[in-house]
Image (cartoon, rainbow, N blue to C red):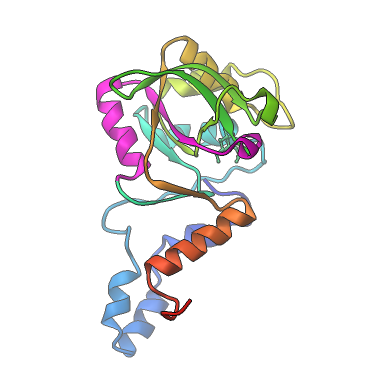
């Protein structure tokens, strides 16, 4: 899903004959191998969300592409490092639940204002029921510190729930309201995920992610 003016994102996934030719001429087979990490595995399609009406509306734009099958949603400003990936954990849980599932990750009390915050009934099989979801609550009003970190698996019934949303809030259709209704109908569950998360939509998270990757890839001199 892209917004108008983000065609570079689309182009990133397209073959680049010019770059290939340049690398071949320079005999950089090593880089040539690296430039198309996805092309063999996936058919990448970009759908444009013409108006910024929020996440629920963005999902509706993708309804045709989803072709009535379960699908994973990954929000690009939430980065995860480490194994297993949240998507893998969600897919494993989905094999049991066969219902839509959202990821959960602990955040600090000060951070609850940035996320959907979830109250759950813990289950031994790690697939938890959802009691409540509050979108970006004040610190004093947050039921827990369990946040939705931008990873979801949805079954196609999500679209019917979204279409029932009547009113915009802060100029956006609130996905949280649709999720809460799904949870009430026992059509939505939650799983805590273990990989390390960085919110690169916030400056501190962006800096932390950059430093963490640089350290992991040993990009700093030894004494830094
Ligand atoms: C969206 C969701 C929120 C979720 C967050 C994760 O908010 O509405 O529930 O916790 O993504 O990043 P946004 O970041 O689009 O404001």
**Res 75 seen here:** yes
Comparing 201 with 8, the one in front is: 201
Left or right relative to 217: residue 146? right
- In this view, which residue lies farthest toward the bottom? 26
Residue interval drawn in magenta: 84-113
- In this view, which residue lies farthest toward the right? 170
Comparing 48 with 73, the one in front is: 73
**Res 155 seen here:** no
The location of residue 85, given as percent across then percent down, is 34, 45
The location of residue 43, given as percent across then percent down, is 34, 51
Comparing 211 with 172, the one in front is: 211
Residue 90 colored in magenta in the image: yes
Q: Quadrant of ligand 1?
A: top right
- Decide: is 113 above or below 20: above
Left or right relative to 87: residue 7? right
- Decide: is 136 above or below 128: below
> What is the count of numbered marks?
0
The location of residue 141, given as percent across then percent down, is 67, 23
């Amino acid at each position: 899903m892209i917004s108008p003016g983000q065609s570079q994102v689309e182009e990133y996934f397209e073959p680049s004959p010019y770059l290939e030719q340049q690398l071949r001429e320079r005999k950089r087979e090593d880089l040539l191998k690296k430039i198309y990490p996805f092309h063999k595995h996936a058919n990448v399609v970009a759908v444009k969300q013409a108006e910024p009406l929020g996440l629920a509306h963005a999902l509706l734009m993708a309804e045709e592409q989803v072709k009535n099958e379960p699908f994973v949603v990954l929000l690009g400003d939430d980065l995860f490092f480490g194994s297993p990936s949240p998507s893998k954990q969600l897919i494993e849980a989905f094999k049991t639940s066969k219902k839509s599932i959202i990821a959960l990750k602990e955040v600090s009390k000060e951070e609850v204002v940035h996320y959907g915050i979830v109250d759950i009934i813990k289950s031994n099989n790690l697939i938890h029921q959802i009691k409540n979801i509050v979108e970006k609550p004040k610190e004093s009003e947050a039921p827990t510190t369990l946040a939705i970190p931008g990873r979801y698996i949805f079954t196609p019934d999500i679209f019917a729930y979204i279409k029932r949303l009547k009113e915009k809030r802060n100029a956006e259709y609130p996905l949280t309201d649709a999720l809460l209704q799904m949870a009430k109908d026992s059509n939505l569950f939650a799983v805590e995920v273990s990989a390390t998360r960085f919110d690169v939509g916030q400056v501190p998270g962006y800096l932390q992610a950059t430093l963490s990757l640089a350290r992991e890839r040993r990009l700093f001199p030894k004494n830094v």
